[in-house]
Amino acid sequence: MAIVIGIDVGISTTKIVGINEDGKVVSPIRIKATDPVTSLYGAFGKYLYDNNISLSDIEQVMLTGVGSAYIDSPIYGLPTGKSDEFLADGLGARYETGLNRMIVVSMGTGTSLVQCDGDDIRHIGGTGIGGGTLMGLSRIMLKTDDIKQVYTLAQEGDISKIDVLIGDISPNPLPGLPRNATASLFGNAKSNATREDIALGIITAVLQTIGSSCILSSLGSGIKKYVLIGNLTLLPQCTKVFPAMEKLYGVKFIIPKYSEFCTAIGAALTYINEKK
């Protein structure tokens, strides 16, 4: 069995997938990062053990992500290469969705935007708003950076206690803006807001800002489909924030099955496509 391994070595997590001879993704896993080298070898060893894969089964290892810069030697003596992270984002998203025209939104510590138009895959910008923002604000405002705790709190929050909504400033909907649309993030926050309300406010601010960045980045391109990848796609609030923005702006946000592993999938595909 020949398998190509893709590893996305990030700031906070390392993700690893295999793509077999049939072009199918094999049991992706992720490991919380302490340092890039330790997390990479830990993830690699666990992946092989869990899937009963031997070193002789592996044709190629492909690395990507900011942490891959710390790896300069072959992994366990195997053929090892590196993939451009933005190219990997695009290839992984295209594999997962089957789309040829889209903007890939990689929601990690920050957020990068990659425009895909057929084989033209290029980085077009990004924003410093992302998971790092969410964790930092949660540490300051909620005294925790346990993301599970934050999104669990947020599920009981009331966004009207944090944000100014159009209905707060106008008795009638404005042109193109329903009364429940956001007029000002945190503009209605009170000093006695509950932890639940604050948690929802933080998550909503991060996700809405990312969503607005996507829409603005595609003006003039005709692209209205945005593929969301990265760890933030796992937040339950994504299923409320992004559909509301779809309705408001007439666009489509897509979260694929292996959204958090798309970059690792794309790294493996870089080698497979070059081989073909």
Image: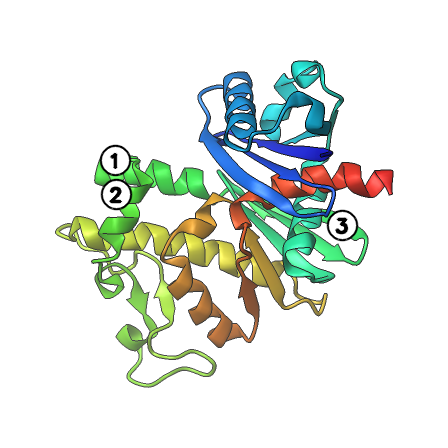
Residue 224 lies in quadrant: bottom right
Taking the spot 30% from the left edge, 35% from the top edge, the residue there is 145
Taking the spot 69% from the left edge, 37% from the top edge, the residue there is 267
Taking the spot 46% from the left edge, 51% from the top edge, the residue there is 233
- Residue 198, how many percent across, how many down? 24, 51
Q: Quadrant of the N terminus?
A: top right
Question: Which residue is outermost to the left?
Answer: 192
- According to the picture, the residue beneath numbered tag 3 turns out to be 121
**Secondary structure category for the residue under label 2:** helix
Position of 206 with respect to 77 (left or right) is: left
- Residue 222, how many percent across, how many down? 71, 70
Is residue 173 or residue 18 the one in the foreground? 18
Marks 3 and 1 sit apart, C-alpha to C-alpha, by 38 Å
Comes first in the chain, label 3 or label 1: 3
Asked whether the beta carbons under mark 1 and mark 2 sit within 8 Å of each other, the answer is: yes
**Secondary structure category for the residue under label 1:** loop
- According to the picture, the residue beneath numbered tag 1 turns out to be 144
Position of 222 with respect to 239 (left or right) is: right
- Three-letter code for the amino acid on which mark 3 is drawn: Ile
- According to the picture, the residue beneath numbered tag 2 turns out to be 149
- Residue 245, how many percent across, how many down? 47, 69
Taking the spot 87% from the left edge, 43% from the top edge, the residue there is 276
Is residue 91 or residue 56 the one in the foreground? 56
Is residue 12 or residue 249 the one in the foreground? 12
